Image (cartoon, rainbow, N blue to C red):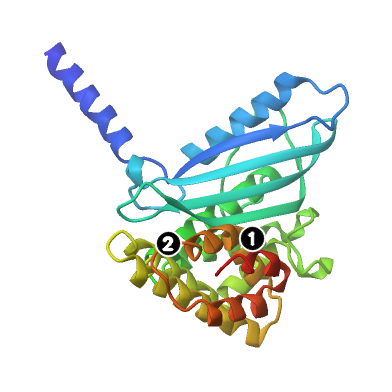
Amino acid sequence: MMRKVFVLVVFLFSLVNLFSQELNATVSVNFQQVANGNPQLFKNLETQVKEFLNTTKWTTKEYTDVEKIECNFFINVNSFGSNNFEATLQVQSSRPVHNSTLSSPILNINDKNFSFRFIEFENLIYDPNTFNSNLVSVLAFYSNLIIGLDQDTFSELGGSEYYQIASNIVNVAQTSGFKGWNQSEGNNNNRNFLISDILSNTFAPFRQSLYQYHRMGMDLMSDDVKKGKEGVVKGINTLAEVQKIRPNALLTRTFFDAKTDEIVSIFSGGPRVNVAPLVETLNRISPLNSQQWSKIK
């Protein structure tokens, strides 16, 4: 009897590991700018944030370990006092390229409006319809953004559900008094503007480009590099439609903050495609990266 119970427990434990949460997040807290900071406090912050990101069930879907989304959260603490932190947050995510060992960067964003209150060992509780703390709300916002972007790369406009959750987090947090949640702040690249643009039909080409670039481009390269490159070009050309509507749009800048180095690498070797029109398009929609585009021959 005891053996049967033991086998059942092992089986259930295996299922938990087989189907698990969505994120595989690494977290790093830098506190070098804080004078006389207690290293253990910041280490505990790092540990609790990592546990929160990796153990919260963000979707109703079942993810296996190999399906988890690789992401990084870098918290750079500028000042600290009485459990209140002033910091910046850099968030990165990537997704695997089909039938290869490569990963493709999806998000690389730096949030400069990251202030929060943190008390050691106090539970971080997530409720999408309630503002419990700015730390939880910001982490939850970016977790849903990461999942939405990831879904958009695998199916066209597939991330809508998670963008809606992120938008709801923004709406709930607007009365919190913390920066980054309101369009009235005059900062047109905060969380509010970011998620509003993603959900706007005006910027649908941004989301369509994610699918074309990855699913119809990067994922084909293991079988046909030239065809894969053509898919990437199509994705960039679709993104260029945003430029006609809103030059230097937040979403265009967000795209190239993650993709510039990869694009240069893709078109700097292997089977050749006609890169002249591509470079012209890249210089038009992302002129700040013109030095990088000049490397594409």
What residue lies at 64% left-to-right and 87% top-to-bottom?
A: 244
Q: Position of residue 123 (x, y in %)?
A: 60, 32
Q: Residues within 10 Å of mark 1 (few under 14, many from 20)?
A: some
Q: Is residue 157 visible?
A: no
Instruction: Determine the secondary structure under disc 2.
Output: helix
Q: Quadrant of residue 97?
A: bottom left
Q: Position of residue 98 (x, y in %)?
A: 33, 56
Give the answer, above or below, for where 198 lies relative to 240. above
Give the answer, above or below, for where 31 lies relative to 171. above
Which label belongs to residue 104? none
What residue lies at 53% left-to-right and 64% top-to-bottom?
A: 263
- The front one of 116 and 268 is 268
Residue farthest toward the bottom in the current orientation of the protein: 244
Instruction: Report the number of discs.
Output: 2
In the rendered structure, which amino acid carries the disc numbered 1? Asp
Q: Which residue is mark 1?
A: 257
Label 1 or label 2, whichever comes before in sequence order? 2
Q: Which residue is mark 2?
A: 151
Residue 67 appears left or right of 196: left
Residue farthest toward the top in the current orientation of the protein: 2
Give the answer, above or below, for where 98 lies relative to 77. below
Give the answer, above or below, for where 167 lies relative to 29. below
